[in-house]
Amino acid sequence: MLALLGVGSCGVPTKPMKQVKQPRGGRALNDRVAIVYSRHYQINLVGFERLHPFDINKYARIYERLVADGLLRPSDVFVPAPISERAILRVHTRRFLANLKDSSTVARYLEAPPIKLVHPKLLDLGVLSSFRHATGGTLLAARQACRHGIAINIGGGYHHAKPGAGEGFCIYADMPIAIRTLQSEGKLRRALVIDLDVHQGNGTAVCLADDDDTFTFSMHQGDIYPIPKATSDLDIELDAGTGDAAYLRILREHLPALFERARPEIVFLQAGCDTLADDPLASLKMTEQGIVQRDLMVIDACMQRGVPVVMTLGGGYSPNAWHAQYASIRRIIETHGRTQPLNRRASPGPRNRAGRT
């Protein structure tokens, strides 16, 4: 099992990755857009990507492309510490934490059976630590959103995790943990979760079901996992084959009512990109440009109402899924995080290709 533990399939860390290792503050772009990321988001079991369709290098690719294209400097990035056990216990049970010491249980949560062969201490160091850092990133992003307006965690969005169990490659319920933490500190009362992943945010719905000050909205494909579904405050089920025009129309129609009903002091956007066409685990037909328009629609709606917004990325299962989320973050930075247009030409990459979370 020691042979499984390594530095990740990206190889030797690049200079930009070395600069986002230790927890520290950053600089919000145009004093409006805070970017949160850590090298420790990278899962460190060599070959893990072959055990699960999720691309463990996706978030690193997004971060490094943003730097390479001149949209972001490593010194701009807010680097999180791992989430504390105290914060985790605001949502999860102590039994759940104890279960994470059992490799077979974690393998089931991750939907990766070979993981059960990994020693629990190695599993904690190589995998669970990455989830704790990314969950800490969502909390840090929430704090920065309250300060600057927009915060993007290049990770997070673990919307299948429930108080007593992980599920669907989700371990810690990062968005509920961030909400509960800020509520406990008196920083906010009312929160809205807008979950646009192709799969229902069942874990988020369960975690926040007893909180009348939170509102959970999930817009997802209706005939796929999870089955049975949980009950969000509002669920919109989409038919297989739904493309950009229909998807964006439905979202546009519902956004005003969501803000009216929830009256949020903060919004959490789960911006999973598995709504893309040709995603191996779903059947919607959105394009990369549709994803870009979708995310900016939500961000703009928040800014027009003066409501801070946290964007988390969720997953993505096609080889080019990372590029759709890169393009989305790029557009948000160009729209809200720059005082002048970007002069440096972006490096070439796939356009209007399919992907998934």
Image (cartoon, helix red, strand yellow):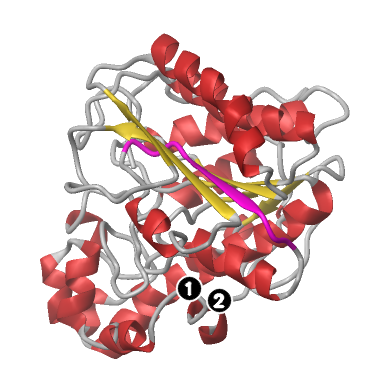
Disc 1 secondary structure class: helix
The foreground one among 298 and 274 is 298
Residue range corresponding to the magenta coloring: 188-198
Q: State the CA–CA distance, disc 1 to disc 2.
A: 5 Å
Q: Is residue 245 left or right of residue 67?
A: left
What amino acid type should be assigned to the residue bearing mark 1? Arg
Q: Residue at x 35, y 29 (%)?
A: 275
Task: Identify the residue position indicated by label 1 in the image.
Answer: 132
Q: Quadrant of residue 285?
A: top left
Q: Where does residue 37 sit, x and y in percent of width and height?
A: 60, 58
As drawn, the residue found furthest toward the top would be: 245
Disc 2 secondary structure class: loop
Looking at the rendering, in which quadrant would you find the N terminus?
A: bottom left
Q: Are marks 1 and 2 in contact (CB under 8 Å)?
A: yes
Image mark for residue 83:
2
Q: Residue at x 52, y 78 (%)?
A: 90
Q: Residue at x 68, y 43 (%)?
A: 263
Looking at the rendering, in which quadrant would you find the C terminus?
A: top left
Q: Is residue 324 above or below residue 92?
A: above
Q: Badge 2 local density, few (<14 within 10 Å), some, or many (20+)? A: many
Q: Where does residue 9 sit, x and y in percent of width and height?
A: 34, 59
What amino acid type should be assigned to the residue bearing mark 2? Ile
Q: Is residue 216 above or below residue 133?
A: above
Q: Is residue 344 left or right of residue 192?
A: right
